[in-house]
Image (spheres, rainbow, N blue to C red):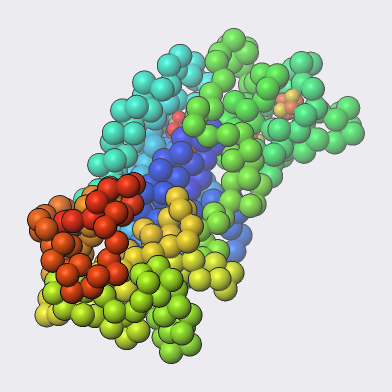
Amino acid sequence: MTIFYFTGTGNALWAARTIAEAVGAALVSIPSVIGEQREYTDDAVGFVYPQYAVGLPKMVRKFIIQNTFAADYIFAVDLYAHIRMGALGEIAGLLPINYGVYLKTPWNFIFALNAPKHPETVLKTAESKLARVIEDITSRRDQRARPSKRVGGATKYFRDGKFKVADSCTKCGICAGVCPARNVELRADPGGKPIFGSSCEICYACVNHCPAHAIYSNNAMMKRRRYRNPYVALGDIMAANSGMGVSFISAFDIRPIDEVLRPMVTDFISEHWFGTDMLIRGEVIDMTKVDGFALLEKGVLTGVITYITCGSVCEITSLDSTVERRGVGTRLVNAVVARARELDCKRVQLLTTNDNLNAIGFYQKRGFELVGVNLGAIDKERALKPSIPFIGQNGIPIRHEVEFAMYLS
Ligand SMILES: Cc1cc2nc3c(=O)[nH]c(=O)nc-3n(C[C@H](O)[C@H](O)[C@H](O)COP(=O)(O)O)c2cc1C
Ligand code: SF4
Ligand code: SF4
């Protein structure tokens, strides 16, 4: 899955990142790829952006029109603060959106209204909604918005920011660094202070991130609070908007295990499982022959998932990775789920052991249901395979199997 995002003050980056971390998607900042013309191909593609004047930011609209997206599932998360009025219709008029959702977030357009005093309260509610959005996306829920030919006000009316710069400007250059449109320059004339071009997106990044609160366009703004999403660092916004916003996850290469990869994968499995025979549901599985996917980072194997299929059931037989909290496991599981769909499987299932608390949490967060506990199953397997240790992860005795399943509609 690839998620494209556009942000001024971090809300869209926060929302896109939350989803990407949960589902293991690659994150791509739209300003970092704007101007390129490509076909983006993935199992799923998402767009996360702030709503401007009840429509798309100009750059998001342009990006969608200039590129093509080949994906079975396309979703949009439209961030708004006060008024939404069917704004999703604009993106649905440009792309076949399978799932469109609004997300209420803190207001950043301080030209018109002050930013909220307690943005955390709004973000707490947004976080709960995002958890539901993640479930919906994982289960590929269908929730279409009515397509419309209407073009949002940002594209129609907003031309340039017409910003003034107060004497408090310290010439730090942050305004130029956060601008997604490269519309701000600090030149010797006028004395190193920023000057604004004519390609403004009106994202209000420069206004809100200026540490001296020096950028304004009406006097009322001078007294208003500045806003940045409290969970996003200034450096993250600068990286996203200055052309470096392609997440590290996209440096990963996920491939089906083939003859070339097989020896490397077999070594990897032996290291993680102390052998290549695995006992699953009473049957010995030869792990040197099973299908699966390998994840390589710059050519180095960092994760492997394997599976077997029987009729309409796909069973995950192993999942291991050498890096944590970087979406490797999620990407591998998603690859198997996508493959199971291609094979018309109705169910993806797996067994883990009672000591593997990480796996028990991991699968439940990714749309798998706990469907059974086989009491004493490992005690019985140990009689057949004495190399199975007595004490497992977290110092917990390994005794039972825990079964998870995802039902594919
Ligand atoms: C120029 C501009 C226009 C906006 N128009 C709307 C709007 O029509 N409706 C709304 O609810 N919020 C509107 N907002 C608020 C943003 O959509 C909202 O604060 C969003 O979360 C900002 O995302 P960001 O932090 O990723 O930039 C507008 C903000 C800006 C800067
Ligand atoms: S961010 Fe503010 S203080 Fe820094 S250069 Fe821009 S206007 Fe001046
Ligand atoms: S000039 Fe300011 S408001 Fe305009 S696009 Fe750049 S950062 Fe956003």
Residue 383 coordinates in the image, percent (x, y) = 17, 70
Image point (18%, 62%), residue name: 378
Asked if residue 162 lies left or right of residue 326, the reply is right
Q: Quadrant of the C terminus?
A: bottom left
Up/down of 241 relative to 398, above or below: above
Disc count in the image? 0
Image point (63%, 52%), residue name: 244
Ligand 2 - quadrant of the structure image: top right
Splitting the image into 4 quarters, where does residue 188 fall? top right
Residue 61 in sight: no
Image point (32%, 47%), residue name: 395
**Residue sticking out furthest to the bottom:** 259
Q: Quadrant of the N terminus?
A: bottom left
Up/down of 140 relative to 162, above or below: below
Image point (80%, 35%), residue name: 186
Residue 325 coordinates in the image, percent (x, y) = 45, 50
Residue 308 coordinates in the image, percent (x, y) = 23, 78
Residue 373 coordinates in the image, percent (x, y) = 11, 55
Up/down of 14 relative to 368, above or below: above
Towards the viewer: 15 or 223: 15
Residue 246 in sight: yes
Asked if residue 181 lies left or right of residue 231, the reply is right
